[in-house]
Image (cartoon, helix red, strand yellow):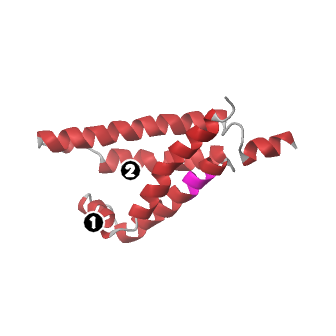
Amino acid sequence: MNYIPLIGRILFSTIFMYSSIANFSDYYIYEATAKGIPSSYILVPLVGVLELLGGLSILTGFMAKWGAWLIILILLPVTFIMHDFWNVEDPVRHQYVLMTFMRNLSIIGAALMISFFGPGPFSFDEYKARL
């Protein structure tokens, strides 16, 4: 049972490490520009770097509570700005944007749990606490 939090951290952090790479694509920068994000050519890659740092922090369990807060601080504005389903008129697109909005809310919830409970066993934070 001690491996469950480790498996959870691996699965949870995967989305951020994958997404961090995508934030360097022209498509993500274009999407942010279309939403009116100023300096999106700087902000989107910066979010990618922060996502990678937060994801690696949670994965390794090194300062995982801080990594979870970093993910929360990234996802809150991204969720409400980029996934504004209430402004989408096309029913198919509305459903897609609503689903991504709800997915982000659930990820924020999981990150809040990590920020409260910590990374659990098999983490650098747990190892430091035992010393």
Q: Which amino acid does the dot numbered 1 rest on?
A: Tyr
Check disc 2 and report the residue beneath it.
Answer: 78
Secondary structure beneath label 1: helix
Secondary structure beneath label 2: helix
- In-front residue for pair 82/13: 13
Distance (Cα) linking label 1 and label 2: 14 Å
Magenta segment includes 123: no
Can the viewer see residue 43?
A: no
- Please state the horizontal and vertical placement of residue 12, each as a whole percent of the image: 51, 43
10 Å crowding of disc 2: few (<14), some (14-19), many (20+): some
Which of marks 2 and 1 precedes in the sequence? 1
Does residue 72 sit above or below 48 in this rendering? above
Q: In the picture, residue 4 is in which quadrant? A: top right
Can the viewer see residue 126?
A: yes
- Please state the horizontal and vertical placement of residue 106, each as a whole percent of the image: 43, 35
Q: Which range is magenta? A: 53-57
- In-front residue for pair 74/129: 129
